[in-house]
């Protein structure tokens, strides 16, 4: 069952917490984030990773004392008025006069997989009861301001507590993906691939960059997903700006167009880039630079495997570009981790773990000629190499030209 996956993750996290605290009692608070006044709610991805829940104002407390560990989920109490406006969601429910869980709490227990459900207004009393016996408290690096403030109050009220950052412990678990996560990432990748093909079929001179962004957004929404980051549709000189996202320039016939897009589906992210000639045919200068980046992509992917570091991949491509006399056009690293966040935690020096998902995104940016090229794939790290999860998205220049020749023969809706 789905909740078994999240329970397994929490159990692994409890073991990490025990190691972090040297076997002494430790408490961990992970909050889902406050509900925004306007806009869609999106949970703290650390909270989601361990619960699978996207409920506002919810808190997971793990109490690890080396003897009898416990996990408790604190949720907002039932709110019929809010349910009328926004729909029902899991809530804390309550206990009846005999001390038994009411139907609301029973439904929440069944739906979340948690046995210990409490209203979130009881957190303070809970902490007063358990904190005096603790040695340390884990600090979530993704916590919102309310939880950061609560942590500060806790440390002030209980000065004997050690504050331990959860960054390394949590990221070490999140880096290596389980089968459930890999399938979710593949789904997000499939959506981004569909959007990249739509760009190939509709991109033409005299369009505006935002029109291409609109096509991307349509494909995302059609597939029940959203952007994992603001889409980069950079044409001409904008193709040489790494994180350009104004997307307001008119696309000229001789422009290269860098399309760096990512879908977020069921909380998991993709991140893919392809670079297209606006008129559908690469010029000699564009093609020359493109083929170097394509070769760099193939070299990097060929060298990905468990135990290699992103730093080593960066150095490998730097040496490759230097041999080509093009390293002055190399502005960024080749990779980052991918998952619940489009940029997952992880340093470039650490060794890649089996079943990590990373990007491979070499690029070259000739600002004098206004030619930017970036080719980005999402790959699964294996002991014996890399599985390219985005392999269905073409990157051969001849195949790209063939796809772009189909412009005007397709409709989106």
Image (cartoon, grey):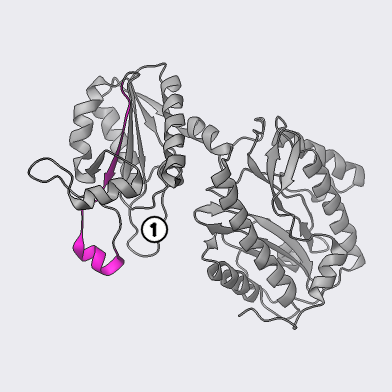
Q: What stretch is highlighted in magenta?
A: 68-87
Rendering quarter of residue 158? top left
Percent x, y of residue 274 = 74, 61
Q: In this view, does 178 lie to the left or right of 203?
A: left
Whether residue 241 is visible to the viewer of this picture, yes or no, is no
| Residue under the image location 78 percent in, 67 percent down | 276
Percent x, y of residue 87 = 30, 65
Percent x, y of residue 58 = 31, 47
Percent x, y of residue 208 = 66, 77
Residue situated furthest bottom in the rendering: 408
In front of the other: 403 or 215: 403
Q: Does 5 sit above or below residue 308?
A: below
In the rendered image, residue 73 lying in the magenta stretch gets the answer yes
| Residue under the image location 22 percent in, 52 percent down | 104
In front of the other: 268 or 274: 268
Whether residue 392 is visible to the viewer of this picture, yes or no, is yes
Rendering quarter of residue 120? top left
According to the picture, the residue beneath numbered tag 1 turns out to be 41
Q: Does 31 sit above or below residue 256?
A: above
Q: Is residue 106 left or right of residue 315?
A: left
SS state under label 1 = loop
Q: How crowded is mark 1: few (under 14 residues within 10 Å), some or many (20 or more)?
A: some
In the rendered image, residue 19 lying in the magenta stretch gets the answer no
């Amino acid at each position: 069952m789905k909740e078994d996956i999240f329970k397994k993750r929490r159990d692994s996290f409890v073991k990490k917490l025990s190691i972090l605290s040297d076997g002494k009692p430790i408490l961990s608070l992970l909050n889902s984030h406050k509900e925004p006044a306007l806009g869609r709610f999106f949970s703290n991805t650390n909270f989601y990773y361990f619960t699978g829940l996207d409920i506002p104002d919810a808190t997971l407390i793990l109490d690890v004392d080396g003897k009898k560990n416990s996990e408790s989920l604190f949720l907002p109490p039932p709110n019929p008025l809010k349910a009328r406006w926004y729909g029902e969601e899991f809530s804390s429910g309550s206990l009846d006069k005999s001390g038994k869980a009411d139907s609301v709490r029973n439904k929440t227990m069944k739906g979340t997989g948690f046995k210990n459900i409490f209203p979130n207004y009881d957190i303070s009393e809970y902490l007063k009861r358990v904190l005096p016996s603790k040695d340390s408290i884990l600090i979530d690096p993704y916590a919102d301001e309310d939880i950061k403030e609560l942590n500060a109050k806790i440390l002030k009220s209980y000065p004997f507590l050690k504050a331990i950052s959860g960054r390394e412990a949590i990221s070490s678990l999140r880096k290596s993906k389980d089968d459930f996560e890999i399938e979710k990432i593949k789904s997000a990748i499939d959506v981004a691939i569909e959007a990249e093909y739509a760009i190939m079929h509709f991109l033409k001179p005299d369009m505006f960059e935002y029109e291409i962004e609109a096509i991307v957004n349509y494909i995302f929404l059609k597939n029940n997903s959203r952007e994992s980051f603001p889409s980069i549709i950079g044409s001409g000189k904008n193709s040489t700006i790494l994180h350009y996202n104004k997307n307001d320039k008119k696309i000229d016939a001789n422009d290269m167009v860098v399309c760096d897009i990512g879908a977020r589906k069921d909380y998991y992210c993709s991140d893919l880039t392809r670079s297209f000639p606006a008129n559908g045919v690469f010029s000699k200068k564009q093609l020359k630079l493109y083929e170097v980046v394509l070769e760099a992509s193939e070299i990097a992917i060929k060298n990905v495997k468990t135990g290699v570091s992103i730093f080593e991949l960066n150095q490998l491509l730097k040496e490759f570009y230097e041999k080509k006399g093009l390293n002055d056009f190399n502005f960024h690293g080749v990779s980052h981790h991918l998952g619940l966040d489009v940029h997952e935690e992880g340093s470039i020096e650490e060794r890649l773990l089996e079943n990590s998902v990373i990007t491979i995104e070499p690029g070259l940016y000739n600002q004098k000629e206004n030619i930017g090229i970036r080719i980005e794939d999402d790959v699964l790290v294996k002991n014996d190499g890399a599985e390219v999860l985005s392999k269905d998205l073409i990157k051969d220049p001849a195949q790209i030209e063939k796809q772009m020749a189909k412009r005007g023969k397709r409709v989106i809706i």
